[in-house]
Image (cartoon, grey):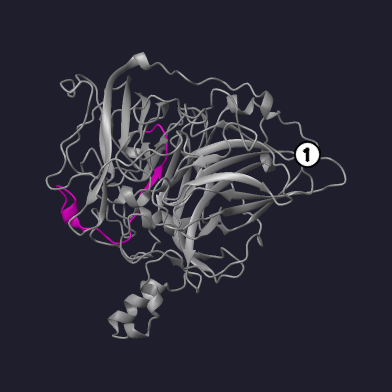
Amino acid sequence: MSKITRRRLLKAGTALGVAGSIPHSIGKTTAQSSPVLEKYVQSLPIPAVRDPDGKRKGAEYHEVSVTEFTQNLHPDLPDTTVWGFDGSFPGPIIEGRRNQQLKVRYDNSQLPSDHLFDVDERIRGTKPEDYPQYDGPVPEARTVTHFHGLNIEHASDGQATMWKSPDGITGPEFVTHVHDIPNRQSRCTTTYHDHALGISRLNVYAGLAGFYFIRSQTEENLNLPSGEYEIPLMLQDRSFNEDGSLYYPDSFVANFAGDTAVVNGAVWPYLEVEPRRYRFRCINQANGRTFNLHLKNESGTAVPTMYQFAADHGFLESVVPLGPEHTLKSLLLSPFERADIVVDFSEYAGETFTVTNTAEFPFRGKNEGIDLPEVFQIRVADPSTKPTDTSADPVDLALPSNSDINKNAARTTRHMVLSMTMDKYGLPLHLINHSRFFEETTVKPQLDTTEIWELENTTHHTHPIHLHLVDFSVIGRGPNGTKEPAPNEQVGKDVVRVNPGETVRILVKFGDFTGKFPFHCHILEHEDHEMMRPFEVVTGSDDNSEENNVDILPALKGEDSHGTAPLGWDVYGL
């Protein structure tokens, strides 16, 4: 049974006229709120792979519960009330196989009717009048689970207005209780997470995220480290109150970061490894924090190379080494970017490595001083005999090419402007093409065609832009989008960092499914507050043909974007 939260205690106290008895610290807005916690005193939890609950219409079927419960995140903290899938934070690993259909239903009927955090009704999507042609209620607690990065039909995509409340009220575009997942795409490491309009930042921060893998025979033929030597890593940040409860501001803030590292649901954990090769599936699941990861040897000596062989989808063109002795010094992941890497610890028996983070917050912006310099620790055992390791040496991996980068195949080039202004409440408002979520859909690519999208950032910090339905190739960066992107971000992407003063060019093919899908900034606070737009994959004539090479909408009346920030940083953002 879940213990009462500070927020619910405050609500109850207000109703009884005793709010004055609640500590004033509940109303603080700084992220620097956590008690001092000792690092590296608990081992890294490894989420379990979820077994199907049976079959449905010939496909493996999962019925996943969405509930509130308590979980201990650090030995020196009282148990923390969280939301999660199947009673765990993060949720279990759901595995699919390439070209084998899967069906998943999420049951949130046991969630409480009031949210774990305060819902700011200034944010669109929290009130009935926010929805065009909808006159139903908008409950405070409501969820919709999105399978990030999957090539999936509109009805099963888990989009922002497809939410459902615990008592069964459904959003204006709710279609089905069961997600049909075809898995007709390359192997991938990705995530399922909440996407409810206006409160996705709150739901994900409460704990609604889990791992999703698509496995393939092609991947297995590479002989990568597997079984206990394949480690999933979900990187997040949180802040805590003294009673162990999660701290999140009472009212909307455009940028929020926690002051404590959480990996796989544990605060500053350690991982014990054997002196051999390991595979790490890395996911940045933070609301808004970018991680720039390095290995630091606590003895002050050399560190092993991180060999990256995949980004979000498929495989890179070739293995990319990351570390002090290489061109790319670190692994850079903005929110919801992923990376698959192999690290060989065979020459480091008895050594201890700290995984450090050098990314400021917000990334490539004015540093707000909420740095998170350490993430977790890796301790290499010193056994009496060297373990047997038959996995492939990452240096020798011949990756299957899944790249088809043909810029000449692009039928249209669209220019998208990322801007920032203020809303009527004085809140920072980040927009794409100066337009809000519910405004007319103007981007309508044709099915089975290829386009180039130019993403120009005129704001003062980085935006990770995510497109539903598709994966894409990054073909240019820099002030004019003409500089070469980093070798570990060129192919197999569905999230791309767009730094201030930069234009990033991506090559996108719209195949398999028609329908309306969103593209948005994956800083969840930005996504919640209007930095999300729809595109619609159509058949027939292209109703954007008169624009041909550009898709820029006029600015909202009286809401001009800020000026362009100076570039001032290297092209790879490292």
Q: Magenta segment: does it hold 223? A: no
**Left-right relation of 420 to 294:** left
Q: Quadrant of residue 345?
A: top right
Question: Is 79 above or below relative to 126?
Answer: below
Instruction: Look at label 1 and name its amino acid.
Output: Glu
**Left-right relation of 48 to 534:** right
Query: Which residue is denoted by mark 1 in the rendering?
Result: 347
Q: Magenta segment: does it hold 149? A: yes
Q: Nearer the viewer, residue 445 or 554?
A: 554
**Left-right relation of 268 to 276:** left
Whether residue 108 appears in this view of the structure is: no
Question: Is 75 above or below relative to 289?
Answer: below
Point out residue 550 in the picture as x, y percentages from the top left corner: 22, 26
What number of labels is visible? 1
Q: Residue furthest top?
A: 408
Q: Nearer the viewer, residue 258 or 182?
A: 258
Whether residue 469 appears in this view of the structure is: yes
Point out residue 230 in the picture as x, y percentages from the top left corner: 64, 40
**Circle 1 residues within 10 Å: few <14, some 14–19, many ≥20:** few
Q: Residue furthest right?
A: 384
Q: Quadrant of residue 506?
A: top left
Question: Is 381 above or below relative to 120?
Answer: above
Q: Secondary structure at mark 1?
A: loop
**Left-right relation of 506 to 439:** right
Highlighted range, magenta: 127-152
Point out residue 340 in the picture as x, y percentages from the top left corner: 57, 36
Most prominent secondary structure in the magenta stretch? loop
Point out residue 323 in the picture as x, y percentages from the top left corner: 62, 37
Q: Nearer the viewer, residue 200 or 397?
A: 397
Name the residue rendered at 54%, 37% in the picture: 339
